[in-house]
Image: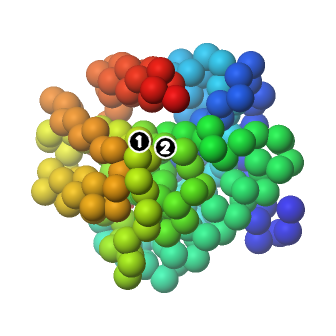
Amino acid sequence: MSEREEFIHRFVPGRSSRTLVLLHGTGGTETDLLSLGRALDPDAALLSPRGKVLENGMPRFFRRLAEGVFDEEDLIQRTHELADFISAAAVRYGFKQTELIAVGYSNGANIAASLLLLRPGTFFGAALWRAMVPLVPEKLPDLKGVPVLLAAGEHDPIIPSENVRRLSVLLEQAGADVTLTFEKAGHGLTEATIESTRRWAGEVRSKN
Ligand code: MLT
């Protein structure tokens, strides 16, 4: 792996050929989502990188100018960097990207959405918790049949519901099979988020 492609990360082998890529929120690390990932799919391998950008000491996956206002040039560059890391990790650890599901929270969900839009083929599907439109690509990718869960909070103070609806439309226009849910919750994760994601992941598995 070249230096550009390397991320501090954890890889936990699984008992199946499935892998979850876990992408933490602002201020998180590579260990944050490991137990949630294990709860979502007890048999999957887990790959969990740490975002390389620091905002007042807090790791993130890309720079922002203000809350909800992204540095698009940095976002595009970091999206490609992360896509290259994931592909290199697939070779290093021997997992298949065709069975790779992204699970991202907040900033991690936003870079996962950006990966779907700019580097389709990186994931087989994605569960995005409290995501928003990261950018609008010049050309829509082909996401035909890609399962995407958007788990939004009705009272999320950071992400207006109109924004996650726009993300849903964008992904649907690209052909993705989007499930959009609104919970009685804010930006934080709840038991209901984990439960609906577990159900969604089970349905995705049974269809494939
Ligand atoms: C972001 O910067 O990606 C979003 O504002 C969510 C967050 O990290 O707070």
Q: Quadrant of residue 166?
A: bottom left
On screen, residue 173 above or below 34: below
**SS under mark 2:** strand
Q: Amino acid at mark 2?
A: Gly
Q: Is residue 169 left or right of residue 176?
A: left
The residue shown at (18%, 36%) is 182
Q: Nearer the viewer, residue 138 or 69?
A: 138
The residue shown at (43%, 67%) is 141
The residue shown at (72%, 56%) is 87
Q: Identify the residue position indicated by label 2 in the image.
A: 125
Q: Is residue 167 left or right of residue 147?
A: left
Q: What percent of the width, then of the height, locates residue 136? A: 33, 74
Q: Identify the residue position indicated by label 1 in the image.
A: 147
- Pointer 1 residue Cβ closer than 8 Å to ligand 1: no
Q: What percent of the width, then of the height, locates residue 39? A: 53, 18
Q: Nearer the viewer, residue 19 or 175?
A: 175
For marks 1 and 2 on the same chain, the one whose residue lies earlier in the sequence: 2
Q: What percent of the width, then of the height, locates residue 178? A: 30, 44
Q: Quadrant of ligand 1?
A: bottom left
**SS under mark 1:** strand
Q: Is residue 55 in view?
A: no
Q: Amino acid at mark 1?
A: Pro
Q: What percent of the width, then of the height, locates residue 121? A: 57, 57
Q: Is residue 111 left or right of residue 132?
A: right
Q: Is residue 82 left or right of residue 186?
A: right
Badge 1 vs badge 2, beta-carbon distance below 8 Å? yes
Q: Nearer the viewer, residue 159 or 67?
A: 159
On screen, residue 137 above or below 54: below
Crowd tier of the residue under label 1, counting other residues whose Cα lies within 10 Å: few below 14, some 14–19, many 20 or above:
many
Q: CA distance from mark 1 to mark 2?
A: 5 Å
